[in-house]
Amino acid sequence: MGLVKIFQSGHFDNSLDRVPYIVFFVSIIFVGFGSSYYHWTPSNASLFWDRLPMTTAFMSFFAAVLSDRINRSLAIYALLPILIIAGLYSLIYWQRTEASGLGDLRFYGIVQFFPLIAIPLIIWLYRSYRYTLTPPISWAFMWYACAKLLEHFDGEVFNLLGRLVSGHTLKHFAAAVATFYILKMVTLSKSRRETYKYL
């Protein structure tokens, strides 16, 4: 759905603006495959393929915000590939340290959480934009925060809900809602974007 929408006419002023969103929604598709693979055969090897598309999605959305709020050419041609490579390296580094018994996730944690700090700052400091509307991003962030909390308190949620559904299961739902708000943001018409600017 996301890929279909971003290729429809009228949503983007410049074809370059589509690039990080294409990477984002392709990554979201592969999140489904990677997550299924990990849950089918849990291991560090399958966890790598679970985390890789998520990392690519984080980095590509970060690049989309940088492109829209700061500099399109710099973000698309330089920062997008650099960010994706950084995300990939963080996972390779984790796997190598895992093999030696350390399992160092610090770099992966930085890659995952730095955009969550940087994006609100960028939105606050750089007020000119075309697509990265504050209300949908705020909702996406809130739902993603819910997803992380549900994941962290997996067992507690499971017990609270009478052992019917786990926090991890609900995490996937919350993350999907967060993605929906990104899709909603990108596919707003120009007239609707102007309306949102006053919210």
Image (cartoon, rainbow, N blue to C red):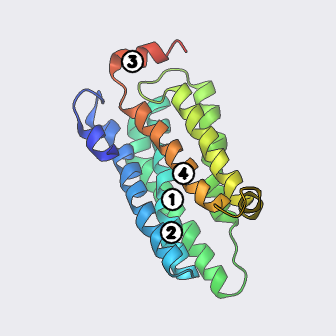
Label 3 crowd bin: few (<14), some (14–19), many (20+), radius 10 Å: few
Q: Are the residues tagged 3 and 4 within 8 Å (C-beta)?
A: no
Label 2 to label 1, Cα distance in Å? 7 Å
Extreme residue in the bottom direction: 100
The residue at which mark 2 appears reads as 50
Q: Are the residues tagged 2 and 4 within 8 Å (C-beta)?
A: no
The residue at which mark 4 appears reads as 173
Quarter where residue 145 is shown: top right
| Badge 3 amino acid | Arg
| Badge 2 amino acid | Asp
> Of the residues under marks 1 and 4, which one precedes in the sequence?
1
| Badge 4 amino acid | Phe
Quarter where residue 166 is shown: bottom right
**From where the camera sits, is residue 163 visible?**
yes
Whether residue 89 sits left or right of residue 34 in the image: it is right
Label 3 to label 4, Cα distance in Å? 27 Å
Extreme residue in the left direction: 9
Q: Look at 67% across and 42% down and name the residue there.
A: 117
The residue at which mark 3 appears reads as 192
Label 2 crowd bin: few (<14), some (14–19), many (20+), radius 10 Å: many
Rendered location of residue 159, percent (x, y): 76, 62
Rendered location of residue 191, percent (x, y): 35, 15
> Of the residues under marks 2 and 3, which one precedes in the sequence?
2
> Of the residues under marks 3 and 4, which one precedes in the sequence?
4
Rendered location of residue 32, percent (x, y): 43, 62
The residue at which mark 1 appears reads as 54
Q: Are the residues tagged 2 and 1 within 8 Å (C-beta)?
A: yes
Label 1 to label 4, Cα distance in Å? 15 Å
